[in-house]
Image: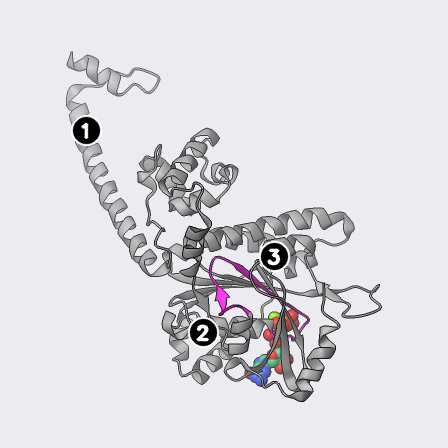
Amino acid sequence: MQETWLISAFSHGQATYRHPRKWKLRRLLSFISHLLCCALDRRLKNDTSRALAGVTVNDNMKNDDLENLEGVGPAIASRFRSAGMTTAEVIVVTPPKEIAEKTGVGFNTVLNIVESARKMLSLNFTTADELWKKRQTMCKCSTGSKNLDKLLGGGIATQAVTEFIGEFGAGKTQICFKLCVTAQLPLEEGGLNGSVVYVDTEGTFMPERIAEIASASGLDPEKVLAHIFLARAYNSSHQGLLIDHLFKFCLENNVKLVIVDSMIGHFRGEYIGMGALSERQQALNSQLHKLLRLTEAFNLPVVITNQVQANPATFFGDPNKPAGGNIMAHASTHRVYIRKGGKGTRIASIIDSPSLPESKTRFKITEKGVEDAQEGKEEAKEDDEEAQVQPK
Ligand code: GTP
Ligand code: MG
């Protein structure tokens, strides 16, 4: 009787006989290893919870809750964790096909898990006023310029991709540097109370400039630099890998702001000519959508920079238009165009946003990073002239 039971317990397709004494030893070893696995797993959960406790400002966000999902046992949970998918939020925003590819779990199983994650988060129809309440809990990160913050509806918003577009020297990178500092401030001081990820695709990240901005703002430069995670992307594919890795990294490192400076640089350099355009746009689209998902899953803002391209056929107005075509235009939530103004000032205009009016303001680049610029009569006249050359 006992032997029959032993045979059936070990039969993975083939029935194999085991000697009872050896079997007891094996059972003991397997029990000890199970205990060790449970202890490790609990530790992992606790660590992630601690990391997440500071990350999110979204009450709905759950910690590492994979095992609570239907169809997820320790083996599948471990595969999901290795692929950087550690919460129900990340699972519901990632396309099932991508989950299956990354985890190696069968597509149908993935569909069931996604369905279970949706149920867990109650992702059904919701009334608009509930969504409105949720959006009121969104955080805004100050740019350091009150004018620019006002233009952006209070600052750089979480759950959104904000794109800064402009020609060389417009001040896009300077805004990103300032955000690296302000994002670390407490919420009541206009910050997001967390760390920053900076994906540098052009090799223009300057720690000494960040240190200068931090010192001028009365902060300890070393502490500020210690909370900026820098990743140098060497080509568009490397950039994609880094973006993929963010889903795990942000959770583990209390990241509250992600910056990609610049989003398009590598794509423009690598995909040359009209023949490569469709392939380029597909690859760019995929990365942009991952960033959008990241903003939703972790309730954080993503800031990207974009270059301009000249249209030689333009006779009137600004010949420059944002690079990246419709793909960039659709993926970004708020698009801000920056151009140089008189007396070293910069003019920022909202050129596309679902919630912000088309308006403009003036700021300047200083030792502190980014600050308000005075609007005198001369500037007002210049602004009127600039209004004629707004890019579309
Ligand atoms: P690209 O990356 O080339 O597309 O340009 P960008 O838009 O990123 O330009 P960036 O943000 O690097 O701005 C460069 C401008 O900032 C230059 O005109 C510099 O004069 C100005 N700038 C950089 N550092 C300082 C500084 O410490 N003080 C002041 N006042 N201006 C600075
Ligand atoms: Mg730059």
**Is label 1 or label 3 in front?**
3
SS for tag 1? helix
Q: Position of residue 259 (x, y in %)?
A: 52, 63
**Boundaries of the magenta span:** 152-171
Question: Looking at the picture, which amino acid does disc 3 mark?
Answer: Asn
For mark 2, give the secondary structure.
helix
Q: Is residue 134 above or below residue 96?
A: below
Q: Residues within 10 Å of mark 2 (few under 14, many from 20)?
A: many
Whichever of callouts 3 and 2 sits on the residue coming sooner in the sequence is 2
From the viewer's perspective, is the residue at label 3 or at label 2 nearer? 2
User: What residue is pinned by disc 3?
Assistant: 235
Residue 140 position in % (x across, y down): 45, 66
Image location of residue 91, percent across then percent down: 43, 43
Helix, strand or loop at mark 3? loop
The answer to whether residue 59 is left or right of residue 242 is left
Of badges 1 and 2, nearer the viewer stands: 2
146 or 174: nearer the viewer: 146
Query: Which one is earlier in the sequence, the residue at label 1 or at label 3?
Result: 1
Q: How many marks?
A: 3
In this figure, which residue is indicated by the disc labeled 2? 181
Image spot of residue 154 (x, y percent)? 49, 70
Which residue corresponds to mark 1?
27
